Amino acid sequence: MNDDAFIVYRSSFLARTAMMTITEIMKYLPHRYPMLLVDRIIEIDEAGQRIVGIKNVSANEQFFQGHFPGAPVMPGVLIVEAMAQCGAILGLRSMPDRDKKLFLFGGVDKARFPPAGHPGRPVTSRM
């Protein structure tokens, strides 16, 4: 690939992706620890139809104390909540006066769970 083709490819890739850090995420969501379940956004497409978020699951998470001792697994309801938080970010990005809005979780259709969230393994939410 020549340099010109690489630049076009790279700018095309960057145009359809975005990166949000935890600081930027906190500007969109009212959630805070321990209920903020999105650590970063690694992709948002140009049309605002797709988002990919990451929750870095640590051994220090409170829910691992009882779910399950000796075989820690992130509870499915928290994985769904992480997905809902990614969806809220996607919806709020283009909403005027978003700081005056509150997204509430309404339901899930056809959700598929990633491999169980274990300490040290990130949970990826794709919508």
Image: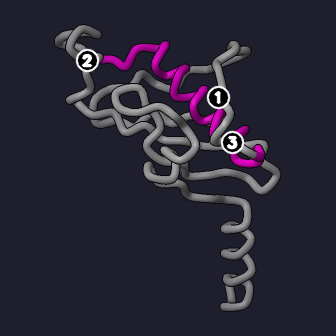
Residue 74 vs residue 34, the one in the foreground: 34
Q: Residue 64 carries which label?
A: 2
**Residue beneath label 1, please?**
102
User: What amino acid is labelled 2 in the image?
Assistant: Phe
**Measured Cα–Cα span from mark 3 to mark 2:** 33 Å
Residue 45 vs residue 31, the one in the foreground: 31
Q: Residue at x 72, y 67 (%)?
A: 15
Q: Which mark is residue 98?
A: 3
**Measured Cα–Cα span from mark 2 to mark 1:** 29 Å
Q: Report x, y in % for residue 109.
A: 73, 15
Q: Report x, y in % for residue 94.
A: 76, 48
Residue 1 vs residue 52, the one in the foreground: 52
Dot 3 lies on which element? helix
Query: Which residues, given as a range, are shown in magenta?
Result: 72-96
Q: Report x, y in % for residue 74.
A: 37, 19
Q: How crowded is mark 1: few (under 14 residues within 10 Å), some or many (20 or more)?
A: few
User: What amino acid is labelled 1 in the image?
Assistant: Leu
